[in-house]
Structures are given as C-alpha cells and as structure tokens.
Amino acid sequence: MESKTARLTVLIDPHKKKAFEELCAAQDLTPSQVVRQLIRDYLDQHGVTYATKSTLAANAKS
C-alpha cells in the first residue's frame, strides 16, 4: 500500500453506494481497497505509468 495518501471525493447515487458497500463487505474488502484496485487497473489498461513506493526506493538507491 502507498505510504502517503490523497483524498478523492466521488459523488454517486446513494443506492449504488449502498450496493457497492454491501458487495465489498461480502468480499471482506473495504470500498477504498476496491477503488484503489479499480484505479490501478484503469491506469494499466491505458498504459499509464506512475511511481510506486518500490520504484521510488529503487531509484533512490541508484
């Protein structure tokens, strides 16, 4: 997990939010975990690269 965080505010329909939270709970995941994975998948799908904690550490050693 990333060591620093930034807040992302998303407005969605309350019924979708409830359904999403229930599904996350049923899968023993937090909504934040699922959203972070969705964002990583979306970036990968579109070929967008970004720094991660491990790549930053590797670059610092170089």
Image (cartoon, rainbow, N blue to C red):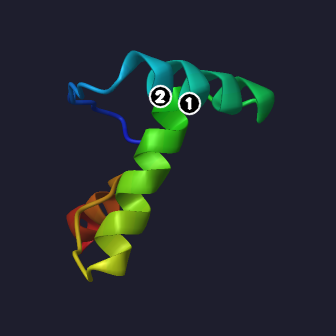
Q: Nearer the viewer, mark 2 or mark 1?
A: 2
- Secondary structure beneath disc 2? helix
User: Tags 2 and 1 in contact by the CB under 8 Å rule?
Assistant: yes
**Location of residue 5 in the rendering, given as x and y in whole percent from the top left corner:** 27, 30
**Location of residue 62 in the rendering, given as x and y in whole percent from the top left corner:** 23, 75
Instruction: Determine the residue positioned at 71% across, 24% down.
Output: 25
Q: Nearer the viewer, residue 1 or 56?
A: 1
Name the residue tied to disc 2. 16
Residue 35 is drawn in which quadrant? top left
Q: Nearer the viewer, residue 18 or 39?
A: 18
Q: Nearer the viewer, residue 26 or 43?
A: 26
**Location of residue 24 in the rendering, given as x and y in whole percent from the top left corner:** 65, 31
Instruction: Tell me the tag on residue 48.
Output: none
**Location of residue 61 in the rendering, given as x and y in whole percent from the top left corner:** 28, 67
**In the shown orientation, is residue 22 left or right of residue 2?**
right
Instruction: Determine the residue positioned at 47% across, 28% down.
Output: 16
Can the viewer see residue 20?
yes
Above or below: residue 6 compared with residue 15: below
Instruction: Determine the residue positioned at 43% across, 65% down.
Output: 41
- Secondary structure beneath disc 1? helix
Q: Nearer the viewer, residue 56 or 52?
A: 52
Instruction: Determine the residue positioned at 54% across, 18% down.
Output: 18
**In the shown orientation, is residue 21 left or right of residue 47?**
right
Mark 2 Cα shell of 10 Å, populated few (<14), some (14-19), many (≥20): few
Above or below: residue 26 compared with residue 38: above
How far apart are the alpha carbons under marks 2 and 1? 6 Å
Tell me the kind of residue under disc 1. Phe
Name the residue tied to disc 1. 20
Can the viewer see residue 54?
no
Tell me the kind of residue under disc 2. Lys
